[in-house]
Amino acid sequence: MIVEFTKAFLETGLVVPLGKQREEFCDSVQRGLVIQIVAMFKTVPRYVWRYKAIDTEKTTYRPLGSIKEISIPQARKQVAQWKAEHSMLPSKHRSRRYQLPK
């Protein structure tokens, strides 16, 4: 579900529906920033960066920390920094994908 992460949302909106093992909420401000919630007793929701790995093009998750350890602006800033670093990496897939047809 895509929502804007706010303090009020973190205090009230982080619920796993009955019958589900986990839930993910995506930030509408910083693309790739996700909050994962696991339906277990005393589990603290955590921020993760969800992205496509350059070499395998598979969805990958990189943890940032729990919502109690990191603020929303800090999480957004960290994801923006990681995205910038990630886009600078060389990719054999990227070069093949953007070649002009012969």
Image (cartoon, rainbow, N blue to C red):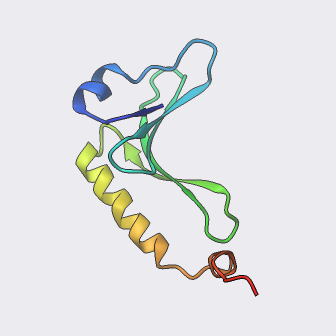
Q: Quadrant of residue 92?
A: bottom right
Report the quarter where the C terminus lies.
bottom right
Judged from this view, the residue extending furthest toward the top is: 18
5 vs 102, left or right, is left
Question: Which residue is rendered at x = 46% and y = 48% of the image?
Answer: 48
Judged from this view, the residue extending furthest toward the right is: 102
Front residue of this view, candidates 31 and 100: 100
Question: Which residue is rendered at x = 67% and y = 71% of the image?
Answer: 55
Establish if 57 lies above or below 33. Answer: below
Front residue of this view, candidates 52 and 72: 52
Q: Position of residue 58 (x, y in %)?
A: 67, 57
Front residue of this view, candidates 90 and 102: 102
Establish if 11 lies above or below 83. Answer: above
Q: Position of residue 69 (x, y in %)?
A: 30, 43
Question: Which residue is rendered at x = 57% and y = 28% of the image?
Answer: 22
Judged from this view, the residue extending furthest toward the bottom is: 102
24 vs 100, left or right, is left
Question: Which residue is rendered at x = 45% and y = 19% of the image?
Answer: 15
Q: Position of residue 10 (x, y in %)?
A: 31, 28
> Can you see residue 71?
no
Q: Position of residue 20 (x, y in %)?
A: 62, 20
Establish if 39 lies above or below 77. Answer: above
> Can you see residue 76?
yes
Q: Quadrant of residue 18?
A: top right
Q: Quadrant of residue 101?
A: bottom right
